[in-house]
Image (tube, grey):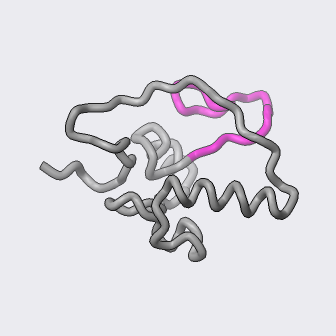
């Protein structure tokens, strides 16, 4: 399990999800383990080729629904679960901001 510092616990507890382009902490952890950052969501909120060619050009919220449908169709969908998270928002970002490796535009 990952701790808040981004290091891995010495006790195996399953998998750790790391999205190198998602946050500075994930990017640092990815670099420490030799993982390359990929941008799967473009500046316009649509999926890019690394996110799955079949989803290319699809808006991220629609892509989520299509992915859930594809998993369910194959009997691989195990359900959803709500979880609490902190999501910083500002008046300039509507809808939700997309985390990105690109520097913010003025």
Q: Is residue 6 above or below residue 74?
A: above
Query: Residue at 78% of width from left, 28% of height from top?
Result: 11
Nearer the observer, 101 or 74: 74
Quadrant of the image occupied by residue 54: bottom right
**Extreme left residue here?**
106
Query: Residue at 64% of width from left, 61% of height from top?
Result: 66
Nearer the observer, 22 or 84: 84
Quadrant of the image occupied by residue 75: bottom right
Residue 30 part of the magenta segment: no
Which quadrant: the N terminus? top right
| Residue 77 falls left or right of residue 62 | right
Q: Main secondary structure of the magenta part?
A: loop
Q: Which residues are magenta?
A: 1-18
| Residue 31 falls left or right of residue 68 | left
| Residue 94 falls left or right of residue 10 | left
Residue 17 part of the magenta segment: yes
| Residue 57 falls left or right of residue 100 | right
Query: Residue at 27% of width from left, 41% of height from top?
Result: 93
Nearer the observer, 49 or 44: 44
**Extreme right residue here?**
75
Report x, y in % for residue 19.
53, 49
Report x, y in % for residue 83.
62, 27
Q: Is residue 106 above or below residue 58?
A: above
Nearer the observer, 57 or 11: 57
Query: Residue at 82% of width from left, 45% of height from top?
Result: 78
Report x, y in % for residue 95.
34, 44
Q: Is residue 5 above or below residue 58?
A: above
């Amino acid at each position: 399990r990952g701790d808040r510092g981004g290091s891995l616990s010495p006790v195996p507890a399953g998998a750790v999800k790391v999205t190198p382009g998602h946050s500075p902490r994930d990017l640092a952890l990815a670099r420490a383990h030799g993982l390359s950052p990929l941008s799967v969501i473009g500046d316009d909120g649509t999926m890019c080729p690394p996110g799955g060619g079949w989803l290319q050009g699809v808006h991220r919220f629609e892509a989520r629904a299509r992915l859930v449908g594809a998993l369910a169709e194959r009997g691989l969908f195990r359900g959803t679960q709500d979880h609490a998270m902190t999501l910083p928002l500002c008046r300039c970002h509507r809808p939700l901001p997309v985390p990105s490796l690109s520097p913010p535009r003025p």
